[in-house]
Image (cartoon, rainbow, N blue to C red):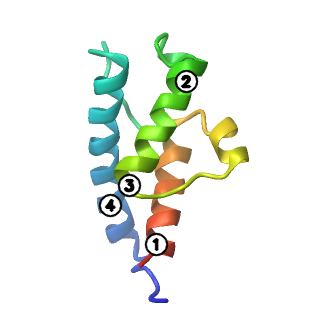
């Protein structure tokens, strides 16, 4: 298994790219959001991010990025920063 390039510039660049992709997914699923999704966004910030839409979002993210969250992650991932971090973790693990 190859290791990920973990220098800070690369990680921040990848995080920014992931954030842009996640923004698109959130708009597709939740509709036109009044404010842009940031790494600081939490579920409580977005009215449309309810329990049903959370499951749809997580399933869509898994499909889009070809990853699989465990049950605990599916339940506990309620902010964008943690979601992006977990996506990076799983993408790195599959390189």
Q: Which residue is mark 1?
A: 92
Front tag of 3 and 1:
3
Label 1 – label 2 distance at C-alpha? 25 Å
Residue under the image location 36 percent in, 28 percent down? 26
Label 2 – label 3 distance at C-alpha? 21 Å
Instruction: Name the spot of residue 13 as percent of width and height, x first.
Output: 29, 61
- SS under mark 2: helix
Front tag of 4 and 1:
1
Q: Quadrant of the C terminus?
A: bottom left
Give the camera-side residue of 40 and 26: 26
Q: Bin the neighbour count of mark 1 within 10 Å (Cα to Cα): few under 14, some 14-19, many 20 and up.
A: some
Label 4 – label 3 distance at C-alpha? 13 Å
Work out whether mark 2 precedes mark 4 in sequence or the reverse, and give the earlier one: 4
Q: Which residue is mark 2?
A: 43
Q: Which residue is mark 4?
A: 14
Label 3 – label 1 distance at C-alpha? 12 Å
From this viewpoint, which residue is outermost toward the bottom?
Answer: 1
Q: Which residue is mark 3?
A: 65
Q: Is residue 59 left or right of residue 31?
A: right
In the rendered view, tell whether residue 38 sits above or below residue 53: below
Front tag of 2 and 3:
3
């Amino acid at each position: 298994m190859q290791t990920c390039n973990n220098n800070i510039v690369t990680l921040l660049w990848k995080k920014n790219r992931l954030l842009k992709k996640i923004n698109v997914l959130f708009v597709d699923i939740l509709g036109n959001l009044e404010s842009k999704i940031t790494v600081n966004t939490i579920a409580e910030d977005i009215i449309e991010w309810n329990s049903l839409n959370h499951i749809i979002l997580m399933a869509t993210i898994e499909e889009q990025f070809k990853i699989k969250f465990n049950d605990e992650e599916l339940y506990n991932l309620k902010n964008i920063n943690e979601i992006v971090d977990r996506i990076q973790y799983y993408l790195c693990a599959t390189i």
